[in-house]
Image (cartoon, rainbow, N blue to C red):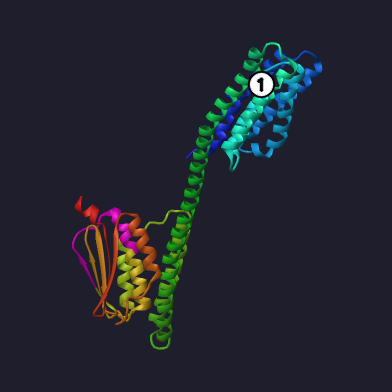
Amino acid sequence: MDTEPARGKLRKLNLTMFLPLFIVGGVVAVVSDARTWWHVVVLSAGVLAAMVAFVRWTSGEVLRVAIPCLVVTALVWPFSVLLVGGGSAFFGILLVGSFVVPQLPRHRVAASITFVVYIAAVGAARLLVSPEDVSEELVEFVFVPAAITAIVLGLMFPNKRFYDVVKELEESREREAESAVIRERVRFASDLHDIQGHTLHVVKLKTALARKLVDIDAERAKQELGEIHALVADTITQTKELAYAQRRLNLSAELENARNLFEAAGIRVRINREGDVDPDAGRVLGQVLRETTTNILRHAQATRVRITLSEWSITIANDGAQRAPLPELRGLAALEQRVVADGGELTVEQEDGQFVTAASFPAREES
């Protein structure tokens, strides 16, 4: 993704392409109309106001300088018409108006009409001081300035819409980036929950078992404590790998771990392999197995667990479901989002004391 915003690029492009042209146009207007040095000063003030408005317009902040720039150019135009006798000074008010009017929050059409009428009315005032050649004065001071102003204003409205679209696209991209960060945080928290929550529950079971064995079978108690130590060490390693985005679930290791945990809890386990699991699916199916194992140990009173594997699916069934409505398990809800994100389906069913969790990738199976 390009790090420089599109609006910033457009601003630089506008400044590079048009600012020199506007400056040259302003200089030409001043030189062609000015007769004395104070004419130069006054007419240059209008050009300067137009340049300020343009620069602020490129950054989307023209309304902050709208009033002073409009006031200056609105005064320079009648000064030029009545005192200087030059028609080029409408250059300044033309630019300022074309930048400001389309940016107004409302009444833009009325403002455009008023703006054009003002330029034409001031130009018509030229007849008060120079009534000799009416047609020529009307063309130079009324028709040409008003027509050019109307055309430029009409062109600036689509231009504003273009900038609005660019702004909306940038905001949409920013929202998408923020959403991606949030999704990644949720994913990280979910993976951390898988690691820490699973381990803590196993440690709890093994610690309870070691407490029972310490007086009757010290060697077995030491073995359980050793397994607890190894499990905690492994969890620390997995947490580090997760933090550095190096963690990968191994389905075979998860199967062996689930078998050991169920047997340690007095639950009989049967594993049916209907085919070799595809490596691409193995990571997600390993997450399903880990989360389901934790849920069975925490929430079920199971005596038997059956795990069925195929190339693109896994099914875990246990007989410890309560005869009550299907419970809400937040871990499975988060897991479903991950499975769906990878193009799979996660189903949870409870019937006649059986609780079945299944994940599959039907689209991949068909292909």
Instruction: Identify the amino acid type marked 1.
Output: Ile
Residue span colored magenta: 270-287
Residue positioned 24% across, 53% down in the render: 363
**Percent x, y for residue 160?**
54, 35
Residue positioned 65% across, 34% down in the render: 56
**Percent x, y for residue 85?**
73, 16
Q: Nearer the viewer, residue 112 or 184?
A: 112
Q: Quadrant of residue 341?
A: bottom left
Residue that label 1 marks: 23
Can residue 366 be seen in this snapshot?
A: yes
Residue positioned 37% across, 73% down in the render: 328
| Horizontal side of residue 330 vs 44, given as left or right | left
| Horizontal side of residue 143 vs 352, given as left or right | right
Residue positioned 33% across, 58% down in the render: 340
Can residue 222 be seen in this snapshot?
A: no
| Horizontal side of residue 244 vs 317, given as left or right | right
